[in-house]
Image (cartoon, helix red, strand yellow):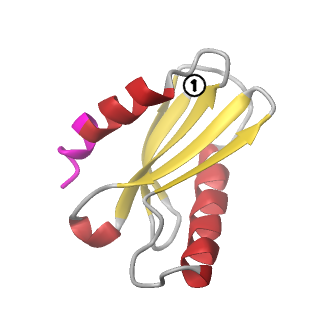
Amino acid sequence: IASGVVDLTTGDLLVHDSRDTLAFDLGARAKRLTAARRVFSVQGDASSGSEELMVTQGARIELLRAAPGASGRYGTVLVLDRRLANLPLIRFKLTQAEKHLT
């Protein structure tokens, strides 16, 4: 439904795109997911943040994934339709796209 590149240190959405006209704020979701990632990183191994964080809410899946390299500063944020999402394919395509971020 929507995707973007997020700064994982601040939670700021740097660039985004959406094919849906639903009234949701991807920027707010990115901030919420990066904050949750920081909380989980503090509880676990603080030296390496979580590579991926996924939240399922009803018919939506929210996914935050850290890009490899780039000192863990950038990542991708996705909002997906749960019924249509093919997570293995999405992860494969994200791996390909992340090569352009580093």
| Viewer-proximal residue among 45 and 75 | 45
- Above-or-below relation of 85 to 4: above
Q: Quadrant of the C terminus?
A: bottom left
Query: What residue lies at 33% left-to-right and 68% top-to-bottom?
Result: 72
Query: What residue lies at 81% left-to-right and 31% top-to-bottom?
Result: 58
Q: Is residue 17 left or right of residue 98?
A: right
Query: What residue lies at 32% left-to-right and 30% top-to-bottom?
Result: 93
Residue 25 position in % (x across, y down): 67, 43
Residue 27 position in % (x across, y down): 59, 51
Q: Which residue is mark 1?
A: 1
Q: Is residue 63 left or right of residue 70?
A: right
Q: Tell me the element at label 1.
A: loop
Please identify the residue farthest to the right as the structure is shown: 58
Please identify the residue farthest to the top as the structure is shown: 84
Amino acid type for the residue under numbered disc 1: Ile
- Above-or-below relation of 50 to 17: below
Q: Is residue 22 magenta?
A: no
Query: What residue lies at 57% left-to-right and 64% top-to-bottom?
Result: 34
Magenta region, residue range? 96-102
Q: Quadrant of the N terminus?
A: top right
